[in-house]
Image (spheres, rainbow, N blue to C red):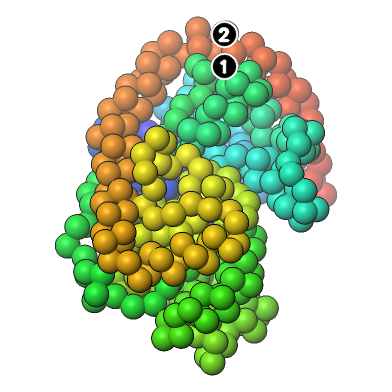
Amino acid sequence: MNHLVIIGAVWPEPNSTAAGNRMLQLIALFQKQDYEITFLCSAMPSDFSFDLSTISVNTQTIQLNNSSFDIIIKELNPDVVLFDRFMIEEQYGWRVIEQCPNALRILDTEDLHFLRKAREVAFKQNRELVFEDYISDVFKREIASIYRCDLTLLISEYEMQLAAESFKIDASILYYLPFLSEEININVPKFEERNHFISIGNFLHEPNWQTVLQLKKQWKSIKKQLPEAELHVYGAYVSEKAKQLHNEKEGFLIKGRAKSVADVYAKAKVLLAPIPYGAGLKGKLFEAMQLGLPSVTTKMGAEGMNGVLDWNGFITSDENEFVEKAVELYTNKSIWKTVQKNGYEIIEKRFKKELFASDFITKVAHIQEHLKTHRNQNFLGQILQHQNLQSTKYMSKWIEAKNS
């Protein structure tokens, strides 16, 4: 039996974040191939962390900058190690190389952090993004991490294109693996059985907070045309500044954590997501399509999701048009039903699990079988490993000595 070790940035919270759902999907892919799985993490679990033992995943707490990890990983002796985001690879990658040199190393980016950072800088400076925005310290760290690993998972077609075409990263070390859908729920409440608008997103994620601020600006115009409508804003880890936006009279309601996304989506008529910047795929929009909830979003929100297919609602980055389309979708039953079907089609043709599961496992097995050749072709990765072992390694050892 093959053994996969996942080193997590946090313990998965599938009811709080799209990243939590993504992690459970990856676990399921490997379990389907009879992998034994161990999840390691240095973070403290929260009240909302998923109990991995319920799906037969072993867990163990590890320490940052501590050689105790070397003993743990050597004893586990994994065939495959998956790093959850590039920061985790920086922390533990060199230790894995030293203790388990023959383990296949996979990086799951979740989304490209340097892309999100570049867009955030441009957004906050109220200007268009330019190429130089990409070339940040985060960019250098993340690209180096990609090269050091045997395979990197990218969740968005846009990010695959960016990595391969703009930054000339060899396709042999990149793999497109988006959110995966196992089924579509078409037995959902009808148009006339629904009321109100909804927005959802973890408040710890800065793009989600900026989305709420965008909604606050636009809501009065929507409310003026639809006086009976309310906007229900859901999201885990509500901040005090978010709570201050709650206004019963305006119908702008900060609801906090949703116990069940499916339940709150079933009651709502339209999802609003004026996402100003970000990266990767947007879990809220993916789930909306799965659950038959039409949406109005921006080009940034829909990026990498619908390809050439018609959207599950409307896409616009113009504030006035956003309001217009929100009202139109909320009031026009015919359009609403048509775009709901668009969403089902996007899921069926672009995110169905069967489209990716077998090919992904075949890719992993092929690299394992030809690991030496694969690594020799990625000579830049070997160079960066050498440099990393001389810098990150000794910084970590210095911190460990300092702490002791």
The kind of residue on which mark 1 rests is Asp
Q: Secondary structure at mark 1?
A: loop
Looking at the image, is 236 positioned above or below residue 246? above
Q: Is residue 93 visible?
A: yes
Q: Is residue 135 left or right of residue 253?
A: right
Q: Which residue is mark 2?
A: 377
Between label 2 and label 1, give the one nearer the viewer: 1
Q: Nearer the viewer, residue 44 or 67?
A: 44
Q: Nearer the viewer, residue 399 or 45?
A: 45
Do tag 2 and tag 1 residues touch (Cβ < 8 Å)?
A: yes
Residue shown at 66%/29% (left/top)?
143
Q: Which residue is mark 1?
A: 170
The kind of residue on which mark 2 rests is Gln
Report x, y in % for residue 230: 45, 81
Looking at the image, is 103 positioned above or below residue 372? below
Q: Nearer the viewer, residue 62 or 6?
A: 6
Name the mark on residue 279.
none
Disc nearer the start of the sequence (2/1): 1
10 Å crowding of disc 1: few (<14), some (14-19), many (20+): few
Q: CA distance from mark 2 to mark 1?
A: 10 Å
Residue shown at 51%/70% (left/top)?
236
Residue shown at 61%/74% (left/top)?
216
